[in-house]
Image (cartoon, grey):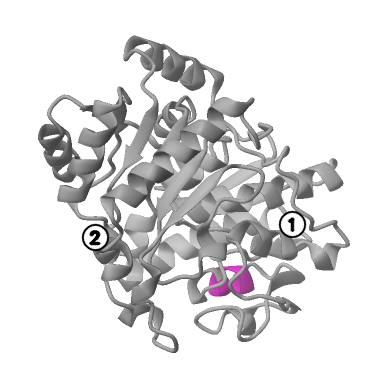
Amino acid sequence: MRLGAIGDVLRVLPAVRRLRRDRPDAKIGWVIEHWAYPMVAGNPNVDWFHVIDRRALDAGPRRAWAEVRRVVEEIKEVHYDVLLDFHGRLKSGLIGWLTRIPVRIGYARGYDSEFNHLFTNVHVRLDDPWENRVLRFLHLLAPLGIDTSYDPRDLGLYVDPEVRRAAHLWYQAQGRPEVAVYPGTSIRRIRERWPAEKWIDLLQRMGERDLRSVVFWGPQEQGLAQRIVAGAGGAAILAPPTTLPEMMAMIGCFEVFVGSDTAAAHMAWMQGVPTGVFIGAKPPRTIAPLDPVPCYVLRASQYYREGVRLGRQPAELVSAVPVGEAFDAVGRLLEARRRGPRSGAAGEA
C-alpha cells in the first residue's frame, strides 16, 4: 500500500520489483489513490490495483466512509496473506486494519507517522530514519526473508511503449535540447522553490553556452513556468501539458535534469539522467539520487540551523543558492553524462 505522493510512489517501485522477482508466483495488489494511479498503471509487476477515489475521501464523512468500505471489500475478495504498508500513516493503517489481512508489515513506533504502528502487527526498525526513501521502502521486505539490497539495474519503472515513442518523437522535433528544468513545487512547499529571477538568470547563462532547456510544469505551476520562459528570452521553451507518464517519458530523453525536490527529479534520476536538485531542510541523503547516477545537491547549507524542526528551517536554504553554483552543477553533470554511456538507467519492468 502506497496511496500517493508521486515521488514516493516512484521510489516504492524498486521494492515492488524485488518482491515480484523473489516471489514470481505471488498475486500482488497495490492500494493507491486515483490521482497517483496513472503513474503505475499497466506496470506488469502488479496484478491488481485497488484505486481509491481521493475526491470521495475529501467530500465529507459519509462519502469518505462509503469509499473506504468499497475498497476494503474489494481487497477482501482477493484474500491476501500479507500487507506491506509503505505509506505509514493513519489513513493507510486504518484501511489495512479493516481488511483483516493476517500479516500487516509496517514501520515500528518512532519510524512511522500518525500512530500507524498501532494498525500493523509486524514492525520494521530502521538503522537510519533519514536514509533514502528507496532504501527505506526496500527494508519493509525484510520480514518476508527477501534481500533488501539496492539494485540500480532493476528499478521496476514502466512507461507504455507508445508513450515512450511519442516522447522520443517530441524530443527530436524540439532539436534534442540538453537540459530539462522543473522549477515548481506544490503550494504547500512553496518555500522550497528557487526564486524565478535566479532561474531566468541560469537559463540565460546556459543559452549563452548553447545549452537549450525545456521548462516542465505541473498543476498550478504553469504561470511560474511561463514567466521563467518569457524572462529567459529564447534560451528555453515551455513544455506542453502532459500526463504523469508523458512527463516521465519526456524527461528521460534529456542529457541533464535540474529542478526542485519533486517527483520530476525522481523521474529523471531513476531513468539514469544526471540530476541536480534543490533541497530544503531534509538531510541530503534522504533525497539525493542513488549511485551510480551522477547528481549534485544544491543547498545553501550555511543557513541550516541545527536542532530546529524541518518546518522552521529558513527558506534561504534554497533561495540563497547562487546562480553560479547551479550553472557549474549543470556543466559538471553534462560533462559526466558525455564521458560515457548513461549510468544507472532503470531496467524497466
Residue farthest to the bottom, as pictured:
307
Residue 99, relative to residue 208: is it above or below? below
Q: Residue furthest right?
A: 145
Q: Please provide percent x and percent y for residue 137.
A: 66, 61
Q: Which residues are magenta?
A: 93-98
Callout 2 amino acid: Ile
Along the viewing direction, whichever of 261 and 77 lies nearer the viewer? 261
Task: Say which residue appears at 21% left-offset and 27% top-offset.
Answer: 235
Q: Residue at x 50, y 76 (%)?
A: 90
Q: Is residue 244 visible?
A: yes
Q: Nearer the viewer, mark 2 or mark 1?
A: 2
Residue at 20% x, 34% y: name it. Answer: 204
- The secondary structure making up most of the magenta span is helix
**Residue 27, visible in the rendered structure:** no
Where residue 198 appears, as percent x and y from the top left, is: 20, 49
- Asked whether, in this view, residue 172 is left or right of residue 32, the answer is left
In space, the residues marked 2 and 1 are separated at their CA atoms by 39 Å
Q: Give the camera-side residue of 6 and 278.
A: 278
222 horizontally vs 28: left or right: left
Q: Is residue 239 above or below residue 166?
A: below
Q: Read off the residue under disc 2.
A: 187
- Residue 141 rendering spot, x and y as whole percentages: 77, 61
| Residue under the image location 38 percent in, 77 percent down | 304
Q: Determine which residue is flagged by label 1.
A: 79
- Contact between marks 2 and 1 (CB within 8 A): the answer is no
